[in-house]
């Protein structure tokens, strides 16, 4: 019971915001219409049940006129039923897509806000496969919440409507046991209730492991798909290393989890289906067994018996909602748990500084200042420290140090995406920062959009983009701006790095951080590009990470990360070169 109320509280937390959002009137209107139609369908069921009594009585009494009248009544009822059923589904689907659209936008917004997506990944306790949660889980949540919610509503209304009918019929068709009438008021209702309680308890007992099994199944399927995507993304390396055999083994290993869990689901579902199918078949006979003695003793008519059987099956069906919907309920609970996990993980990434020591980011002054900064790994181990380190405006600083000493992580902390640690990073007001990594990212699509990323497509004139590409030594690409492609895959790493620098020229940041961003270029090309940066962005502060000594010539100050006990510290400063030599 505690579990059920906890799940319902989560469902409310996930579902309610849509009905309070800017789309609330459309959402509430559609929901009201669908609920009204669901109720109208139950009303028609009640009318058909009463019709059955009149219809079978007309047959038993060989009353032709009554028979014809009943046929016409049925045609009218059936036509209304069809129209309601069609529009109930249509409006339900309409509500589903609007709700899903809102929820998807909401989750995408939260996931991509700030650097939440990145922090979730860093923490390691992140929700697995957020892509699956934003696609399939959202879709299934909306679909199943409506199906289950409306099913439950329909069952409750059906129950109340038919219990009244069944109560009346119980009195009209008294229970006969061993040739004598036994007066138990509403005995048919009690019979249906006992039958349903027995069915629900057994169903839950047999089917409860399905919740967890479904949860795991979704996870294994998503893991398998994610691994396939990684093979596709890294196919060149795999082919060069002849890694196909290893990949096949690894993928089959992942797929093995999908299969093993599926066998678990199959065996549980088999047991559950064996029970629910027997339960439903026995429910067909059960009311006849109860009222047949009264019928054969000629206490009731055929119409009464048929109406009783149909009303009993409606009451029993409504009471057994849990039995029939058990598999969907189990799936739904696992979907709810997955979306809940996603929301929790987003919240924990957003609120990380509130729970753990975190680096403070300040916007002030005219320089980048690191004060008492200690950058940690996500597990809290200190990695690199800077007691007091200032990067003046328009400076050219080269950061060096042993591999793994924490240079890139220090850049991440300055960029504000690495929260683990203590101390303060001060960034000048209104300063535009740009980080260029060794392997720049280009979104799929037109080359022009890939270069100007993350700016919008039209943010720069085509001529500006073309000039930037020519300046960085990519004249051929300058002619292919409108071409679609997977640029990370189609270009050499050196070309990608040139493209990254073209992006920097276009955006003209105040602070440009180059994390081995020219390491794949030959030394003369690297030198030419550094001279280009100095010429085109004379006011920009440039901070580079690099291992080559030839870089010294393009920087005014060199900072080395030096080992101090278990960590590295920003120290060992010296002039790298005269500014004149850099230009
Ligand atoms: N997300 C992470 N989770 C755990 N450890 C990490 C993470 N990112 C980096 N590290 C660790 O932090 C250390 C510093 O990494 P970083 O990339 O900053 O080094 P670096 O000085 O830039 O190295 P290189 O010169 O080889 O590029 C490494 O030991 C690395 O394994």
Image: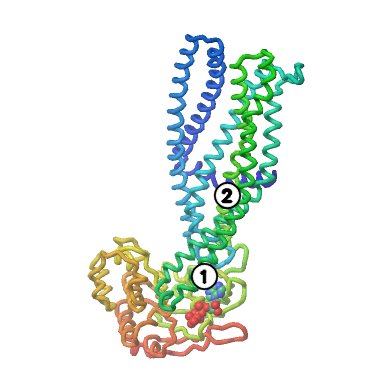
The quadrant in which the C terminus is found is bottom left
Count of number-bearing discs: 2
Q: Nearer the viewer, residue 129 or 534?
A: 129
Answer with the quarter of the image where residue 452 lies: bottom left
340 or 328: nearer the viewer: 328
How far is mark 1 from mark 2, CA to CA?
33 Å
Viewer-side residue, 577 vs 33: 33
- In front: label 1 or label 2: 1
Q: Is residue 288 above or below residue 124?
A: above
Q: Are marks 1 and 2 in contact (CB under 8 Å)?
A: no
Q: Which mark is residue 249?
A: 1
Is residue 396 in view from this perspective?
yes
Q: Position of residue 243 (x, y in %)?
A: 46, 75
Asked which secondary structure carries label 2, the reply is helix
Looking at the image, residue 509 lies above or below residue 181: below
Coordinates of residue 315 in the picture (x, y in percent)? 62, 28
Mark 1 vs 2, N-terminal side: 1
The quarter in which the N terminus is drawn is top right
Q: Which mark is residue 336?
A: 2
Q: Badge 2: how crowded within 10 Å, few (<14), some, or many (20+)?
A: many
Residue 569: x %, y % from top left: 56, 83
């Amino acid at each position: 019971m505690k579990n059920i109320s906890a799940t319902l509280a989560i469902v409310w937390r996930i579902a309610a915001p849509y009905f309070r959002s800017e789309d609330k009137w459309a959402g509430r209107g559609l929901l009201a219409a669908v609920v009204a139609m669901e109720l109208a369908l139950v009303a028609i069921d009640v009318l058909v049940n009463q019709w059955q009594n009149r219809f079978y009585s007309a047959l038993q009494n060989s009353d032709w006129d009554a028979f014809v009248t009943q046929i016409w009544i049925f045609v009218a009822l059936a036509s209304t039923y069809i129209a309601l059923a069609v529009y109930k589904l249509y409006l339900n689907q309409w509500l589903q897509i609007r709700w899903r659209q809102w929820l998807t936008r909401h989750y995408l917004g939260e996931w991509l806000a700030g650097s939440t997506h990145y922090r979730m990944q860093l923490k390691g306790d992140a929700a697995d496969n957020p892509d699956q949660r934003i696609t399939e889980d959202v879709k299934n949540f909306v679909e199943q919440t409506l199906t289950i919610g409306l099913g439950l509503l329909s069952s409750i209304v059906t129950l109340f409507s038919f219990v009244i009918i069944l109560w009346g019929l119980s009195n009209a068709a008294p229970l006969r046991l061993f040739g004598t009438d036994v007066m138990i008021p509403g005995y048919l209702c009690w019979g249906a209730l006992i039958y349903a309680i027995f069915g629900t308890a057994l169903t839950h007992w047999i089917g409860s492991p399905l919740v967890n099994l479904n949860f795991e199944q979704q996870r294994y399927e998503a893991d398998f798909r994610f691994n396939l995507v990684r093979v596709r993304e890294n196919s060149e390396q795999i082919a060069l290393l002849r890694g196909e055999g290893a990949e096949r083994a690894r993928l089959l290993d992942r797929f093995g989890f999908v299969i093993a869990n599926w066998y678990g689901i199959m065996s549980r579902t088999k047991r559950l289906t064996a029970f629910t199918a027997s339960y439903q078949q026995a429910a067909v006979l059960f009311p006849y067994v109860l009222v047949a003695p009264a019928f054969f003793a000629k206490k009731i008519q055929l119409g009464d018996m048929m109406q009783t059987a149909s009303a009993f099956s409606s009451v029993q069906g409504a009471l057994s909602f849990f039995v029939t919907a058990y598999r969907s309920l189990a799936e739904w609970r696992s979907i709810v748990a997955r979306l809940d996990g996603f929301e929790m993980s987003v919240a924990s990434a957003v609120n990380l500084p509130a729970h753990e020591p975190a680096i403070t980011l300040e916007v002030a002054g005219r320089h980048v200042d690191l004060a008492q900064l200690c950058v940690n790994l996500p597990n809290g181990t200190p990695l690199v420290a800077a007691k007091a380190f200032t990067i003046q405006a328009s400076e050219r600083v080269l950061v060096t140090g042993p591999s793994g000493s924490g240079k890139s992580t220090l850049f991440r902390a300055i960029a504000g995406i690495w929260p683990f640690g203590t101390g303060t990073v001060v960034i000048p007001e209104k300063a535009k920062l740009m980080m260029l990594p060794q392997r720049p990212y280009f979104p799929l699509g037109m080359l022009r959009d890939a270069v100007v990323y993350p700016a919008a497509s039209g943010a720069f004139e085509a001529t500006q983009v073309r000039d930037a590409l020519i300046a960085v030594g990519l004249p051929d690409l300058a002619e292919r701006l409108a071409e679609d492609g997977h640029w990370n895959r189609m270009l050499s790493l050196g070309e990608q790095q040139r493209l990254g620098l073209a992006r920097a020229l276009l955006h003209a940041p105040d602070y440009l951080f180059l994390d081995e961003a020219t390491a794949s270029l030959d030394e003369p090309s690297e030198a030419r590009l550094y001279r280009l940066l100095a010429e085109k962005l004379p006011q920009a502060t440039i901070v580079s990470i690099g291992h080559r000594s030839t870089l010294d010539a393009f920087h005014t100050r060199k900072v080395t990360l030096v080992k101090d006990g278990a960590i590295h510290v920003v120290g060992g400063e010296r002039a790298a070169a005269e500014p004149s030599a850099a230009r």
